[in-house]
Image (spheres, rainbow, N blue to C red):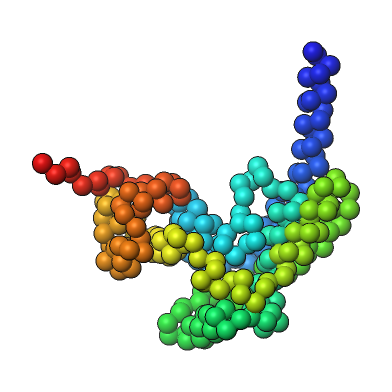
Amino acid sequence: MADGKRKKTQASKSKSKKTDWTKDVLGNWAEAADKNDCDALGLNDAPEWVVNALVECVSIVFPSGLPSVDKYDGRFLGEFLGRLRGLESLFAGEVPLDPEAQAEKEKIEAIAKNKSSVKLPKGFEKDVLTKFGATREAISLATMTAASASYKDAVGFHKGLARGIEIKPDELATSRTFKRHTRTYFILAQHWRFWVKCKSLREVYGHLCKAVGEQKIGSFKTFEKVCKKINFKLRGRGRPKAAK
């Protein structure tokens, strides 16, 4: 029995060592990417639920989404870094897009060029270039490290990298990527400073329905589930009183 437990412990430690390299590479990438961070999204003083909401939004552009930390492996690392590299190529005009995706890309670019409608923080361009550079360095590090990883992780990394870099013409079109509540998550994250001043989720729900429409937000019960997923809480639940 003791020998059996010892073997399982050793196997567990061995597996941990084989997979920890993915977290090490991601840690190095995050540190390098944040060197010139200008807090473009205004997250430095944001509650944790805001970051959770943005993760729900961002995950739609990754082939397999964004798994929990305990599920990070070589394939995820490859897809993650590959997709960041692919997005760099996308905005450099190197990726062919279908009409819908191209129109959406041009709309985003037009908004960005209109400085009166969008106020970019100081150092934004330097921040973006720093993140691009960090991604390329991370890909080089990961490729080198994968050579010493397990067979499964090494194969998974290279397959994930290839899948992540390749952006198909219609892959990022809103009609394909947006999930049912992506819009809700985005609005909650974008205007979080307004929502935290509300007294209850019922009040937040009312504002959202008025601005976007109840049909797009869903019922209040559905909205509560959306908030629960990102751990968005306020002082009161704000449920309506039962009719007498």
- Residue 54: give x, y in percent of width and height: 50, 59
The residue sitting at 25% across, 47% down in the picture is: 238
The residue sitting at 50% across, 83% down in the picture is: 107
Left or right, 112 with respect to 2, comes to: left
Position of the N terminus by quadrant = top right
- Residue 236: give x, y in percent of width and height: 27, 44
What is the total number of numbered labels drawn onto the structure image? 0
- Examine the rendering and report whether any part of residue 70 can be seen: yes
The residue sitting at 54% across, 57% down in the picture is: 55
Residue in the foreground of this view, choosing between 151 and 100: 100
- Examine the rendering and report whether any part of residue 92 can be seen: no
Q: Is residue 90 above or below residue 205?
A: below
Residue farthest to the left, as pictured: 244
Q: Is residue 33 above or below residue 92?
A: above
Position of the C terminus by quadrant = top left
Left or right, 82 with respect to 108, comes to: right
Residue in the foreground of this view, choosing between 32 and 98: 98
Q: Is residue 106 above or below residue 82?
A: below
The residue sitting at 50% across, 77% down in the picture is: 120
- Residue 43: give x, y in percent of width and height: 49, 60
- Residue 4: give x, y in percent of width and height: 81, 18
Residue in the foreground of this view, choosing between 172 and 78: 172
Residue farthest to the right, as pictured: 147
Left or right, 64 with respect to 116, comes to: right
